[in-house]
Image (cartoon, coloured by chain):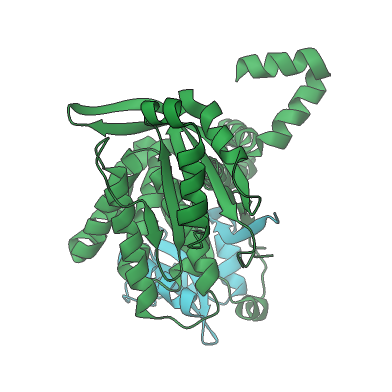
Amino acid sequence: MVDVFLSLVTFVGLIGAFALLIAFNPEKIEKWASIINRIFAGFGTSFNFAHKRYVKHDLQSRINEFTKRVSTSAPYFDNTKVSIQWTEKNLPKKAFLEEGKVILRLRSNDPEDENFVHGAYWVVSTQLLPKMKRYVAPYQRQALDLYVTSKIIEKEKHHVIENFLEHYLHPYMEKNSKITDMYQQFDKIDKYGVFYSVLLQELYFLSMKVYGGPKNNRIVSEVAKLVDFLEKVSSRVIGEEVELNFRGEFSRFAIVIIGKPFKMSLEGTDPYTNFIRRDLVTTKAETIYLLGRYEHREFIDEVCNCLPSELAVYKKHRYIGTISRKEGKSKIEEYLIVLRASGIDLFQPH
Amino acid sequence: MPIDKKTVNAVHDDDLLDLLEGLGLKNKFLNSQLTCAFCDETITWQNLHSIFPDSGAIKVCCTKPDCVNQLIALKRLE
C-alpha cells in the first residue's frame, strides 16, 4: 500500500495521490477518519461530537469494506453501500410514524464495542441480500446473517467476537439445529477460497429472479440444494469427479475447473471451449465460473477469448484458495473468471 | 451499475433523550415504564436496541437476540 502511494505521489503529486486514494478506497479513508475521531473523543465531553462521528464511520466503513472484498469475486455485490444516517433529535412523532423506519440506538459509553456487534448484525440482517431473505426459510436467513456477521467481526474487530458469540450465535444455535448445520456448511464452503463468494453471488441472482413473486417452498428447497452443491464442490479432493453444473429452477450455473496439465498441453483450449459451447451454453447456464491455478491464467484467458460473444466477462479475480489432496490440504494461488450470459433478465435496484 | 445505497437510521446516546421527548417516551423511559414490545422487559440504558413504529404506535426493542430477530421479521413482512 505504501509503495503504491509513493508511486502515485511521484506521478500525480501529493494532492492527486490523496484524491486517487479517496476515489478508489473510500472505506479505508473512512476507517482512518473513524480512528482519528476516536482519538478526539477521548479528550473529554467537549469532544462528544467526535464519538458520534467515530461510531458512524467505524460501522459503515467496515461493512462497506466487506461488501467490496466479496465483490472481487462476486461482482454484483459491488453496488451495495451502507450509510448510517443520524435521526434528527427533534423528529416529530408524526414524521417518525409516517417514515416507518427502525431507529437503531448506538451507545456513547461502549467499552465492550456493543455498537459494532449490534450494528453489524442489524445491517447484515436488514440490508444485505434483503430480497433473497424475503423468500427463504427463517433458519436459512438466520444462518446466513450469523455467518456473514461473524466473518465481518472476525476480520474487522476480532476482540469482540466473544461478545457476538455469546449474544447472538450461541443462543440461535442452541434453539435450532438447522441453523447450526447450515452455518457449518457455510464455514466449510468458505474455507476453500472462492466458493463462498459464488454462493453469495448466486443467492443474489436467485433473489432477482424470484423478487415480486409469491413465497414458496421451491425457493427454500433450491437454496438448500445450492448450499449442498457448493459444499460438495468446495470439499472435493483433487481428481475426484463431482457434479459441477447446478441446474436449478431459479439458479443455473456451472463451475469449470481448468487444471489438468496434460490435457492443456496436448489438446489446448478446444476441450474446454467445446464443452462450454456444447454442454453449458446450449443448456442455458446463466453464469460460468472458470477457475484454475494462477500460473495457468494465460491459458484460462485464452479459453475465455474463444468463447461465444453472448458470454460476457464480469470479473477476473486472483485469490488464495485451499485445495484438498489425498495427502492433505494446501494453499495455492488461484484465478477465477466470472462469465455471465447476455439476455438474462436481472432486476437491478435503483 | 447503479449503486444500491442502503440507509440505516440511528440515534446516538447524546441525542436519545431529545428524540424520546419528541416521540413522547422520555418520561416513561426515565421512570422505567418503557417495556420491550416483544418480551415486556423494562427498557434501560443497558438494553435499549431500537425504536420502531408499528400499527400507528411507537415501540421499542431490547437487545435480546430473540426480540431483535422478531423485529427483523416484522419489518421484513411490511
In the picture, measured across the screen, residue A17 lies left or right of residue A325, that is: right
Residue A37: where, in percent of width, then height? 61, 35
Towards the viewer: A85 or A140: A140
Res A228 quadrant in image: bottom left
The residue at the far front in this view is: A266
Is residue A329 something one can see in this rendering? yes
Towards the viewer: A142 or A341: A341
Q: Report the chain shown in green.
A: A
Is residue A129 something one can see in this rendering? no
Question: Residue at point 70% right, 29% down?
Answer: A21
User: Is A348 situated above or below B23?
Assistant: above
Towards the viewer: A30 or A310: A310
Q: Quadrant of the C terminus of chain A?
A: bottom right
Towards the viewer: A26 or A231: A231
Residue A44: where, in percent of width, then height? 57, 36
Residue A60: where, in percent of width, then height? 57, 47
Residue A86: where, in percent of width, then height? 63, 57
Q: Quadrant of the N terminus of chain A?
A: top right
Question: Residue at point 38% right, 38% down?
Answer: A193
In the picture, measured across the screen, residue A224 lies left or right of residue A133, that is: left
Q: Report the chain shown in cyan.
A: B
The residue at the far bottom in this view is: B55
Question: Residue at point 47% right, 67% down?
Answer: A132
Callout count: 0
User: Is A94 situated above or below A341?
Assistant: below
Question: Residue at point 56% right, 69% down?
Answer: B20
